[in-house]
Amino acid sequence: MLNHLQTKKFKFTTANLKALPRNPSHSSSTELEFSDTEVIGLKCLSGKTDSKRFMLRYSINEQKKSIAIGRFPDVDLMSARKIARTHKTQIAQGQDPRQERDQLHAVPTISQFFYDTYLPLAKKRKSSWNKDKQRFNDHCGTIAHLKYSELTANHIIQIQLRMNAPSKTKPAS
């Protein structure tokens, strides 16, 4: 294999990724970029602290873009190639994988929605908003961490079943 400093384009293997040089500390660039010849667009960036990460560079709608895949060796080479190929399939179908990822991150969790959207409006319009807050805290803890896009009817049914379960304490007479 040619010296990595002579060619920055070669077929990635785990061994040669581990052997990649770090970017010199005096370099004006943050990272050295190496390209895989097996999956076109797959890059491995080597930083000044010897950290390495995978990235896919691509063009969509005549715009150059990139999407992070993960750090090496946390994400192994086979997984990085598989993810890159999946992204390339989306790109071929006219879908921007980065835009889809960003939209997914934009979906709030149940808790974020409750505290950032619902509760401020309820405080302005309902005198009983504090009861809504108490109900949320009492009954929705198991779903609070879920993104709204992950919420299913089964989650709601489970909450309703717990709410309707016989109480362990006797009602006041």
Image: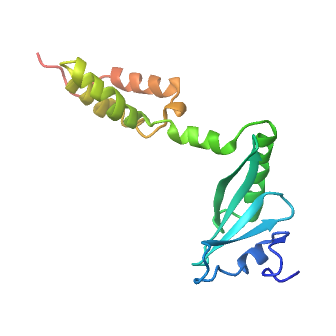
Would you say 133 lies left or right of 61 here? left
Res. 45 image quadrant: bottom right
Task: Relative to 104, say whether 40 is above or below.
Answer: below
Asked whether 150 or 19 is in front, the reply is 19
Asked whether 136 or 45 is in front, the reply is 45
Residue displayed at 56% across by 39% down: 104
Asked whether 144 or 86 is in front, the reply is 86
Would you say 152 lies left or right of 57 here? left
Task: Relative to 73, say whether 146 is above or below.
Answer: above
Position of the C terminus by quadrant: top left
Res. 129 image quadrant: top left
Would you say 8 lies left or right of 55 here? right
Position of the N terminus by quadrant: bottom right
Residue displayed at 61% across by 80% down: 27
Q: Is residue 87 visible?
A: no
Q: How far from the left and from the top, in percent, is residue 110?
A: 42, 33
Q: How is the image coloured?
A: rainbow
Q: How far from the left and from the top, in percent, is residue 114?
A: 35, 31
Residue displayed at 61% across by 73% down: 51
Q: How many marks?
A: 0
Task: Relative to 128, say whether 24 is above or below.
Answer: below
Residue furthest to the top: 173
Q: How far from the left and from the top, in percent, is residue 42?
A: 77, 59
Q: Is residue 91 visible?
A: yes
Res. 16 image quadrant: bottom right
